Amino acid sequence: MESKLLVKDKQIVIPGEDLAVGYDFLPGRGTFRTGESIRSKVLGQVRLKEKLVNVISLSGVYIPKPGDGVIGVVDDVQTTFWVININSPYKGILLLSEAVKEFVEVSKTDIARYFDIGELIYTKVINVTKSKIVTLSMMDPRAKKLRGGRIVTIIPSRVPRLIGKKGSMIEMIKEKTGCQIVVGQNGVVWLKGEREDLATKAILEVEKESYTSGLTERIARLLEEG
Amino acid sequence: MKAGAPEKLIIDGKRLDGRGIEEMREIEARIGVLKRADGSAFFRFGNTRALAAVYGPRQLHPKYLQDPKKALIRCKYNMAPFSSYERIRPGVSRRSIEISKILTEALSQVVFVEEFPRAAIDVFVEIIQADASTRCAALNAAALALADAGIPMKDLVSSCAAGKVDGEIILDVAGLEDNYGEVDMPVAMTPRDENIVLLQIDGILTKEEFEKALDLARKGCKKVYEAQKAALKEKYIEVDEDE
């Protein structure tokens, strides 16, 4: 049986659509195999990587995976841990031991003095169990509390486009607006600076047009015009 | 206006609304019609209009319903009070509970529920105008809304009704044919592999008639699928222009 690719790179496909037949191709992200054919699981855009066929979803929620940097809001403070809303169907657990380096005598301390309800943090996902229990950590050089500024939420699957190749897109927005920007893999973007409005506009434009080509130039123009 | 029972439902091979016996009503499908939902869709069969909204996957409450192995799909079918000739009493009815259940079961067959343990996927379908085959329209809209929400699925679900009026097997039962016809048979299937995910019969068919009706419904589902496919791709058409 001869293997054959049925789609082009960057093509929009729908759930159940055949992408390739035969065993010379491998089902990647957003795809599944039934018998000889590889099909798409989602409404998305095809990305070919040699023999690997991926489909990048055009929408959907954030599903945490270890190593992701995410922006979350403290939802609840318990005696030894915090519950963090990470813009996902699953809440994150931040243990005291993963958040504070010093010794804390739990019986005598209210740990809300470190992180209180409603505060914004950039944190790392360190573990995700099979039934999606998510543990977070602040023991990372980039993890920090985010003070002031504003947040913009975009579709999580479009975050890579906002960051761009080696951070090109986000660096350009930072440079041209002079804003401080932190992008969470969960689609939450924090920004702070004089020209927040312009940066927000650019970010939302990237989200809207994420599946088109020649986007970097268009965003550059949008930023120039102010 | 609601008319009394007509003497004949098929005259010279033409139905009351002028269609041939194997002809479907006009189909219209659109996605992303509701701004605040995670996914939404509109589907129309002639005068039957359904609006579907999908929320989730999201946290499931009450907690005892959570399944550590898979997501729970919750489907709610509702007819708007103004959707039919007579006012529909608002709230749940025996009929809406039944349809909600069959929609949930049909959609659970195609969604990769094991990817979202402990979560819920909520599907709300509102019938804004009813003229027979509302469950088919509801299912078609719901499948589109799920795809729009980015939920992984094995395939879409396409649905269409077949029936029997004046002794003839017909496709896409509408209006008076539903009220005064002999049989109404809604069918839903995954269009690629033709796995049937919903089949109900209201009336009596012989084996031969059933096979003919099923075959006709299958053809109808294919047509519905083409409309669904076009609706999904239409939203992101700009890509092709760029190339």
Image (cartoon, coloured by chain):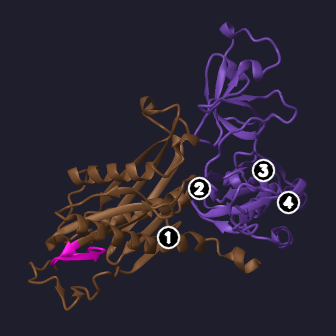
* Residue ID at (66%, 53%): A30
Is the residue A176 above or below the residue B58 in the image?
Answer: below
Residue at mark 3: A191
Mark 4 residue crowding within 10 angstroms, few (<14) / some (14–19) / many (20+): many
Say which element carries label 4.
Answer: helix
> Disc 1 or 2, which lies upstream in sequence?
2
Say which element carries label 2.
Answer: loop
Q: Amino acid at mark 3?
A: Leu
Residue at mark 2: B150
Is the residue B41 above or below the residue A78 in the image?
Answer: below
Residue at mark 4: A169
C-alpha gap between disc 3 and disc 1:
39 Å
Give the x, y percent position of residue B224: 44, 72
Q: Which chain is purple?
A: A
Q: Amino acid at mark 1?
A: Gln
Q: Which chain is brown?
A: B
Query: Chain letter of disc 2?
Result: B
